[in-house]
Amino acid sequence: MGQGISLRMCTRLPRVAERLDEERLEILRAWGAGLSTSDRDELRAAGKAIVMLIEEIDRLQADVWMAGEAAVHRARAAEAAAARAPEPEPEPVAEPEREPEPRFQVDGADTIALTLSERIARGRAPTEPAG
């Protein structure tokens, strides 16, 4: 039941459609200054509270502006660093392994024997010659 009442009350509250621009802030600042010089304690307290809130708004706006400037500065520094960074060197392409050439010239049966010993040294099984 309590939740239904609060929902109805929230829908009846006026919505803030416009933001506080500089003109409105100056009007509120003048009201706060005027109220803070009042003879009545509650009006003087309200005036001081308005002035304090306007000053806080000013500080927050400055903080937001400085944070935006810092973000722009960081983005520019990152772009400059990226532009200065050397491009990565391409990885060298491995050349296919070549069959080692015999260290000396031989003929016929000696060539087959040499070929067999090379294959055995490499760990390959010998193949039979075609023919």
Image (cartoon, rainbow, N blue to C red):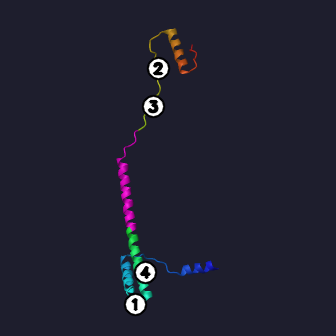
Q: Is mark 2 on a helix, strand or loop?
A: loop
Q: Identify residue for label 2.
A: 100
Q: Which residue lies furthest to the right in this view?
A: 1
Reading the image, the residue beneath label 4 is 49
Query: Label 1: few (<14), some or many (≥20) within 10 Å?
Result: few
Question: Is the Cβ of the residue at disc 3 closer than 8 Å to that at disc 4?
Answer: no
Residue at 38%, 79% in the rendered image: 24
- In primary-sequence order, the first of circles 2 and 3 is 3
Indicate the position of residue 130 as horizontal and vertical percent values: 56, 15
In front here: 87 or 29? Answer: 29
Q: Name the element at disc 1.
A: loop
Looking at the rendering, the stretch of residues picked out in magenta corresponds to 63-89
Q: How crowded is the residue under tag 2: few (<14 C-alpha within 10 Å), some, or many (20+)?
A: few
Question: Mark 3 or mark 4: which is in front?
Answer: 4
Look at mark 1 in the image and give the residue it sits on: 39
**Which is nearer the N-term, disc 2 or disc 4?**
4
> How many residues crowd mark 3 within 10 Å: few (<14), some (14–19), many (20+)?
few
Q: Is residue 25 above or below residue 70?
A: below
In this rendering, the answer to whether 46 lies above or below 84 is: below
Determine the secondary structure under disc 3.
Answer: loop
Camera-nearest label, 2 or 1: 1
Percent coordinates x, y for residue 116 in the rendering: 54, 15
In the rendered image, residue 34 lying in the magenta stretch gets the answer no
Q: From the image, tell me which residue sits under label 3.
A: 94
